[in-house]
Amino acid sequence: MLIKTPQKLQLKEQDVTPENIYFNRRDMLKKMGFLGASSLLASAAVSSKANAIEWFSEKEKASFNLEPLTYQADNNNAKLILTPETKVTTHNNFYEFGAQKHQPAELSQGFQVNPWQLTISGECDKPITLDYDDLTTMFTLEERIYRLRCVEAWSMVVPWIGFSLADLLRKVSPNSNAKYVRFESLHDPEQMPGQQNRRLGGGINYPYVEGLRLDEAMNPLTLMSVGLYGKTLPPQNGAPIRLVVPWKYGFKSIKSIVSIKLVSQPPKTTWQQLAPQEYGFYANVNPEHDHPRWSQASERRITTGGLFSRNRIETLPFNGYGEQVAHLYKGMNLRKNY
Ligand SMILES: Nc1nc2c(c(=O)[nH]1)N[C@H]1C(S)=C(S)[C@@H](COP(=O)(O)O)O[C@H]1N2
Ligand SMILES: [Mo]
């Protein structure tokens, strides 16, 4: 993550979706008794102005569970304001499609996500390979509204759709050697221009690799996401399946995953290898541990305002999810284990 001068994002005011339409429609439909996925999708239809995105099938919609209440409450009881869909899908970090915020949306539109294979293997008794359809049909999907805090000190609030990584890992029965989980993104330079060109791709060695400790991976907050705003993921947000770890800096939330491997040793992650003194393995959001080149005490929350409107808020320890995850790090020095 290099410091750059802000890029223009070609966002016009009319493209910005007021998040209250999404919320109000949803509330209203709920009150009218249209519980469940159809209300979510109806509201998404109202708010959607995104590029050609495939919609969930009737079968998938029928399986949505829309009551993830504990995950939707902000920890200060402040009302969470959703980041408009247009911003979620045009202000991205996905270096395989370019290291500037506007490039993933522009350069990923032909990305082929079907067929897709995701293999879960390594230290487990029942390795499996999932095909494209399995990703959205094997588990009950639920909507979770999470804060996403990038290490670059901006943040968003995103209504993800997905399932707990724990459910997937239980399926393969990890054995007693499994201590960590290693994730790998697709490596396909023909489709991912940033993998052909070091400048475009931000100087990263691909494939992009991330990792979690097994207990972090099993925490119920850790989400495998297949959609946002009621639709399948657009390519720039990590289609067809990506990780979302809301208490860690955004770079842990690896996109377009093809391999999940249970391993005994901490995996060597992409950013750690590139700049170990700046990006650690844990990468828990921590306002008390500054990045060597900037403060992590506050963040710019991207909401409905102009792109560079001053909407500075305090950064919370574990991004506000301390109640759910602080116990994982008991006794650890989190400044050393940054
Ligand atoms: N494969 C891959 N995954 C990735 C990245 C990337 O460049 N490549 N960027 C990360 C970073 S730095 C962030 S902040 C989030 C951004 O997710 P979003 O674009 O959906 O907001 O994706 C993460 N996952
Ligand atoms: Mo990030």
Image (spheres, rainbow, N blue to C red):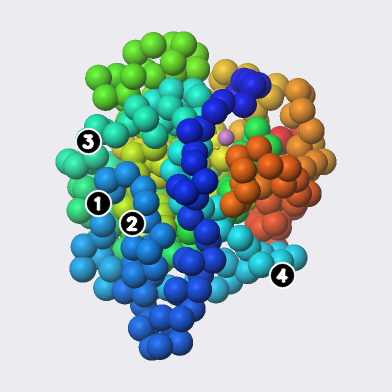
Q: Which residue is mark 2?
A: 231
Residue 259 against residue 292 in the figure, above or below: below
Q: Marks 2/4: CA distance?
A: 27 Å
The residue drawn where x is 66% and y is 67% is 79
Q: Residues within 10 Å of mark 3 (few under 14, many from 20)?
A: few
Tell me where residue 137 sits by quadrant.
bottom left
Please say if the residues under marks 1 and 4 sit with CB atoms less than 8 Å apart.
no
- Kind of element beneath mark 3: loop
Please say if the residues under marks 2 and 4 sit with CB atoms less than 8 Å apart.
no
Residue 158 visible from this viewpoint: no
Which mark is nearer the camera, 2 or 3?
A: 2
Q: Amino acid at mark 2?
A: Lys
Q: Which residue is mark 3?
A: 112
- Kind of element beneath mark 2: strand
Please say if the residues under marks 1 and 2 sit with CB atoms less than 8 Å apart.
yes
Q: Which residue is mark 4?
A: 77
Q: Is residue 81 left or right of residue 338?
A: left
- First in sequence: mark 2 vs mark 4: 4
Q: Amino acid at mark 4?
A: Asn
Q: Residues within 10 Å of mark 1 (few under 14, many from 20)?
A: few
Q: Amino acid at mark 3?
A: Gln
Q: Marks 2/3: CA distance?
A: 17 Å
Q: Which residue is mark 1?
A: 54
